[in-house]
Image (cartoon, helix red, strand yellow):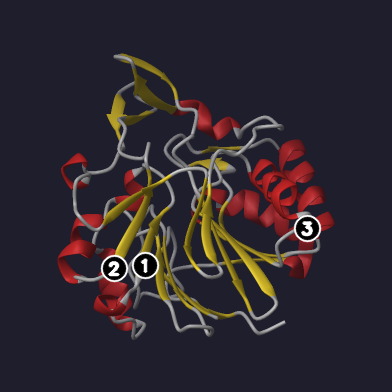
């Protein structure tokens, strides 16, 4: 499997643009599927794709992890360039979602509602199978407390603004050549809860986990406390999986995870190319 980072908060060099967002290009070896997991906040992912020799019109599937602009803001640009891909979005992801900024202003951070009825969008729920060896999971059981960085995130429900419950978040699972790879956009439901849910369904842990863990709040310049990060580190180490994180994990929390987990975790910046070998 080949993974190329098309958009992320940081970049490997000045040759690649960066933004507060995430987009991963995935090319499977088996069945030669070309997949995009999230499309970032703008059309930046399309620009970086060209520099990484990724032909966006060839993408077969787009999975949008949840209903926030930093993961689906580039959707209109993608649909304009790619004319064939099926787009898988949770059926709650086109709701109205907001972020309470440090200046106390409630800012809309949802998807472009004008795209909801696009004929290529397939609305998902719970456990949804896309193709052989490729499916998404939602409806995550929240056993452990959610990241405190979620507290500034809200949604509209029955005409009222309430705390976001992140029911619109979905996780991508790809099984290939003896490996199970779990992709998470932001892990708003908590990376530990996500892995526990996967274990409940599968009776085992994934071999690789890739994506954001939402251990920081960049707009407020804050992150989870060190005790919470250390508890996450200990849990992740006990899964024996390999982790590649990015985006909303935050650099300081990542450095803390890295100091505990060593080679079990690495960071993915825009422009990075990753190869997952067969098991």
Could you tell me residue 98's position as x and y percent? 34, 30
Q: Is residue 177 above or below residue 144?
A: below
Closest to the observer, 101 or 56: 56
Residue at 41% x, 25% y: name it: 154
- How packed is label 1: few (under 14 Cα within 10 Å), some, or many (20 or more)? some
Q: Secondary structure at mark 1?
A: strand
Residue at 53% x, 67% y: name it: 268
Residue at 78% x, 60% y: name it: 261
Which badge, 2 or 3, comes first in the chain's sequence? Answer: 2
Q: Mark 2 — residue? A: 85
Q: Mark 3 — residue? A: 204
Left or right, residue 103 beside residue 166: left
On residue 243, which mark appears? Answer: none
Q: Mark 1 — residue? A: 61
Q: CA distance from mark 3 to mark 1?
A: 26 Å
Determine whether label 2 and label 3 are within 8 Å by CB. Answer: no
Left or right, residue 78 beside residue 128: left
Which badge, 1 or 2, comes first in the chain's sequence? Answer: 1
Residue at 32% x, 74% y: name it: 59
């Amino acid at each position: 499997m080949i993974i190329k980072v098309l958009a992320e908060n940081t970049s490997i060099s000045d040759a690649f643009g960066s933004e507060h967002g995430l987009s991963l290009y995935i090319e499977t070896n088996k069945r030669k599927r070309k997949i995009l997991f999230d499309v970032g906040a703008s059309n930046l992912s399309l620009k970086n794709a060209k520099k990484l020799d990724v032909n966006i019109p060839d993408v077969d599937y787009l999975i949008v992890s949840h209903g926030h602009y930093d993961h689906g803001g580039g959707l209109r640009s993608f649909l304009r360039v790619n004319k064939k891909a099926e787009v898988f979005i949770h059926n709650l992801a086109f709701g109205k979602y907001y972020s309470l900024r440090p200046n106390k202003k409630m800012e809309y951070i949802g998807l472009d509602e004008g795209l909801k009825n696009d004929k290529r969008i397939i609305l998902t729920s719970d456990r949804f199978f896309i193709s052989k060896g490729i499916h998404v999971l939602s409806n995550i059981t929240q056993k452990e407390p959610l990241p405190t960085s979620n507290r500034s995130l809200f949604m509209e429900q029955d005409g009222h603004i309430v705390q976001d419950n992140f029911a619109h978040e979905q996780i991508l699972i790809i099984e290939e050549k003896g490996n199970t790879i779990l992709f998470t956009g932001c892990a708003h439901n908590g990376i530990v809860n996500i892995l526990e849910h996967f274990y409940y369904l599968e009776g085992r842990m994934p071999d690789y986990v890739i994506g954001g863990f939402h251990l920081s709040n960049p707009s407020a310049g804050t992150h989870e406390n060190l005790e919470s990060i250390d508890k996450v580190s200990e849990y992740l180490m006990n899964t024996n999986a390999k982790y590649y994180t990015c985006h909303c994990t935050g650099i300081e929390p990542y450095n803390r995870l890295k100091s505990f987990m060593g080679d079990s975790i690495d960071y993915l910046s825009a422009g990075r190319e990753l190869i997952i070998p067969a098991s």
